[in-house]
Amino acid sequence: MRADDVGSSLETESAIPVQPLYDRGSLPPDWDPDERLGRPGRPPYTRGPDEDMYRERPWIMAQYSGFSIPEETNKRIKRLIEAGQTGFSMALDLPTQVGLDSDDPRAAGEVGKVGVPIDSLRDMEILLEGVDLRALRQPRTTANSIGPMMVALFLCAAEKQGVRPEEFSVLLQNDVLKEYVVRGTYIFPPVHGVRLTSDVIEYCGKYLPHWTSINVCGGHYREAGGTAVQELAFSFADAIVYLDEAQRRGTPLQDQVSTIWFFFNAHSDLLEEVAKFRAARRMWDTLLRTRYHIEHAPARALRILAYTGGSTLTRQEPMNNIIRVTLNALAGALGGVQTMGTSSYDEGIALPSDDAAMISLRTQQIIAYESGVTRTADPLGGSYFVESLTDELERLAWAEIEKVEAMGGATVAIESGYFRNAIADSAYRWEMDVASGARVKVGLNAFTIADERDGPQIAAFKTDRSAQHHMTERLKDLRATRDKNAVELQLGNLRAAAANPNTNLIPALTDCFRVYATLGEVVSALESVFGRYEQGLSRIGG
Amino acid sequence: MPQRVLIAKPGLDGHDRGGLVVARILRDAGFEVIYSGLRQSPDVIAHTAVSEDVDLVGISLLSGSHLEHCAAIRQRLDELGANDVPIVIGGVIPDEDIPTLREIGVSAVVGVGATPSEVVSAVVDSIASTCIRPVGEGDR
């Protein structure tokens, strides 16, 4: 494409048409800033969940890390803490996320590949060796189907360190519903998955009010190709399932709700993204007030974890991705998020190198400490355009939520394939728009340089079998040295607890891990009661 | 009869955006597309290909274990007598693995950044070059 032929779309990424100018007439005559915006730290929280926002300290900077074996991850955590990172993530490998031990044949080739393998409490001990849980502002994990298992493992690890659970806090992803649609690490049928997720929400509401029991995930819908509207709508529809279940249980709903966060993507349409974060906070306040009658206003303040969009990056001219990540992260900062993770510019080519991971952290630090955007809360609040976009996103998202509710709610919409098809259709539209040039990706479909068309070679993933060997040896030793009878006894108790749908499973899980039952054994025990979920064939057109 | 393609996801990797977009590209090019669902074993994929009588198997992989999975699926297809069903792979595939994939019997590799028309060409050409039916029938 020649420069004159390249035109930037006049619609936002969610296909909202944008006018040449926004002014007083762009907002309804009865648009009342006191009602629509309020003050930061006050309902409806459009302007942020805290009064001071970033004036005292910026958001928590939490990079995605965790690779290979627990020993290596432990070293990386220590290094990042030294560099000033304030939260750390524990990315788990795929076998762990689907509840397979490292010596399971189905785990072959996947151990330690996209995260750290955790087979038992012993791996948690190694991972946290020399790391004081109390010194971390916010450890977090990608456990979803195994959400309550991770809670139990953290409780046992803390017990070993002599640290009480009140002295540290963990941020759990623990959102099983989107796994059936876009992320794929489901284990049990949805009804049992929701029970496990809800066990964590209830347990934290009761005993660990300062932990984050769940990150209701919109971000994965976005990364899979969904629009900002679908990201908001589907995550809220999922949240409604968890809230209905939380309400059904005996623990006061307000206590449970206070432990819920959301995870959103920070994507490339800068102002639409800012509007999205603001709309999400107002929607949460509305939902909790009107549908769940949460009277205590602070319990309705939504806290957001944002991660920059890996799917906005290109393999071609990879250094351009540093600029894309900067813009995405700026949207998070201007949108008032509480925790942010940024991508590495080389993500499309290989697993992030150390240098790229450092630039990614530096990007956040430069925005937080040099750009000046942290000096005041919600700096774009009151902009005619941003307020119009915030209203429009909210309106479109509620309309979509109502559509899902009319189908019978998120669980039904997921099982019928509605969510999945809607997301895939959006992804397809996007790819077609990129192919036609209707959407511009610089260096990919516009202003391309002939030599760069294919981009750098994709570096070979290390199909490193040594991690699997290492973990298998440790499991062999573990199985030989632990108290077998105690393990059998506790797994039996777990099966019995699982058979009673009104029992919260976290105490039984903790008892299992304390005597060094493995994650795979625990999941098998639950599978004998719950069964396993299979996605099955689907037909697309013809 | 439209030609049929099975899009398959072996291994534990749950990222199916690419596979589902390719499914839609092929649908719009006139194919009937069957999607395997996640975490299918090579054995199940090969059996599905045979029982659904597909003309091509498209494998989507981002986890790095493409060599093992492609070899296993090719072998099972051959054992089931489906040696005329070509395999095309898409996803994150290092260039240095392409010769090995060819030796295994993979007809085409559709890399990151392939355009929709390149995807369709790879599938049409792969079916045409291994198809025992007269050339021309697959034209559309």
Image (cartoon, helix red, strand yellow):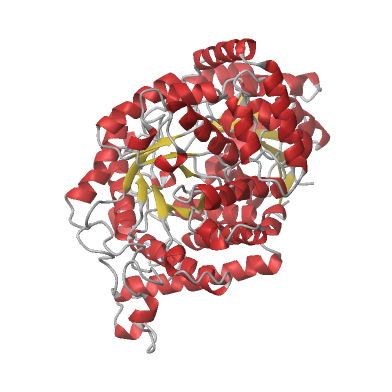
In which quadrant of the rendered view does residue B130 lie? top right
Instruction: Name the residue: 28% across, 39% down.
Output: A361
Residue at horizontal 50 percent and vertical 72 percent from the top: A295
Q: How many labels does the image show?
A: 0
Can residue B45 be spotted in the picture?
Answer: no
Examine the rendered structure and indicate whether residue A487 appears above or below residue A344: above
Residues A365 and A108: in front is A365
Query: In which quadrant of the rendered view does residue A448 lie?
Result: top left
Report whether A472 appears left or right of A488: left
Q: Which residue lies furthest to the right in this view?
A: B51
Q: Nearer the viewer, residue A509 or A191?
A: A509
Vertical position of residue B52 compared to residue A269: above or below = above
* Left or right: where A336 falls relative to A472: left
Where in the figure is residue A470, as x and y percent of width and height?
52, 13
Residue A514, picture quadrant? top right
Residue A367 percent across, percent down from the top left: 23, 50
Query: Going 69% across and 28% down the picture, which residue do you hit?
Result: A490
Residue A49 horizontal side relative to residue A292, left or right? left
Residue at (49% x, 39% y) in the render: B114
- Residue placed furthest toward the bottom: A29
Residue A78 x, y percent position in the rendering: 32, 27
Residue A25 visible: yes
**Residue A130, image x and y in percent?**
36, 23
